Image: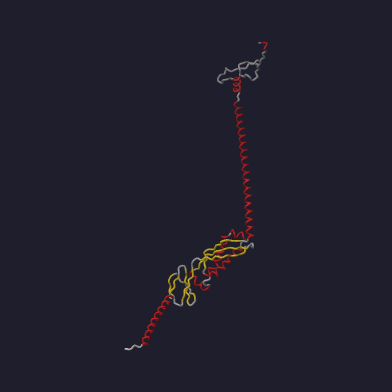
Amino acid sequence: MSVNIREIKNGSVKKEFKGLKWIVAGIAALVVAANSFAIVPAGNTGVVLTLGKAGITGLDPGFHLKVPFVQTVECMSNKIQVYETPASAVSSDMQNVSSNIAVNYRLISSDTPKMYEDVGLDYQTVLIAPTVQECMKSATSKRNAEQLITDRQSISDEVKTALDNALNEYGIYIEKFNIVNFDFSEEFNNAIEAKQVAEQNLLKTTTEQEQARIIAETDAEKKRIAAKAEADAILAQAKAQADANKLLEESLSDKVIAYEQIQKWNGVMPKVTSGDSGLLINIPLDDTQSSSSYTAPEKTSVSEDNE
């Protein structure tokens, strides 16, 4: 039996072509299957694009089916993001102010599709950057340089509120606004330093004067207290002496005087006596004895020749 070589070749080619079709079909099926679903990572919202048009509702994190080659899913992060930038402004007293600021923000999940449709993925450059600069300039222009230093927290709160009012409608929520630092011109910094030195010197001088005044008042008070104590002591001593004199005066009766004279008498009769000499007087020594009183002699004169 003879075999036709051409037929054998044609059959072999057909088999190879058939196998190739299956391979192509399998690859196509895999490609279609791969484009039939989307996975949205945690902390993201999926924006469904149907032939480039954004859908109204976003996709939550997880597995989702979609129309292959017709729909695509763009993931947008809803996590807190940080935007840091330098900012320059002018204070109310015409001082140039440079600052570094940091904005913590996140996209509101329900507004993410609208954000994508209106702004796209470059929302930080399109929305956040210019709005931050504008709000910072507005808050800075209301205060002088010294207030910018002392009122930093109130400025941060004011700028955060302004950013929220401007960006919330686009689906951006401001978590926190921080002013990292303020920097002024070298001339202004030198002026601030000189002012602080002057204030410290004034405070030191005032403190020293106050201390000197307190010391002087304390010394004067001590002297006043000492003088009052001395005067009180003298007064008390005088009062005590007066009370003693009064008591002594009240206690000097005729009997006491006579008794003292008797106690001091040496037993020698005077050569010249008189009734009014006051040396011996008629004073009873015992009130209970009516007849045992001593009567002084009448006034007489005795000369030594008559003895």
The mark tally for this picture is 0
Tell me which corner region of the image, top left, top right, bottom left or bottom right, holds residue 228.
top right
Q: Is residue 75 left or right of residue 242?
A: left
Q: Nearer the viewer, residue 273 or 25?
A: 25
Q: Nearer the viewer, residue 265 or 61?
A: 61
Quarter of the picture containing the C terminus is: top right
How far across and down, in percent of the image, does residue 217 sit?
Answer: 63, 44
How far across and down, in percent of the image, does residue 239 sit?
Answer: 61, 33
Residue at the farthest left position: 1
* In the depicted structure, whether residue 305 falls above or below residue 82: above
How far across and down, in percent of the image, does residue 224 sit?
Answer: 62, 40
How far across and down, in percent of the image, does residue 292 sit?
Answer: 57, 17
* In the depicted structure, whether residue 207 falls above or below residue 61: above
Tell me which corner region of the image, top left, top right, bottom left or bottom right, holds residue 231.
top right
Q: Nearer the viewer, residue 235 or 192?
A: 192
Quarter of the picture containing the N terminus is: bottom left
Residue at the farthest front position: 2
For the rendered model, the colour scheme is: secondary structure
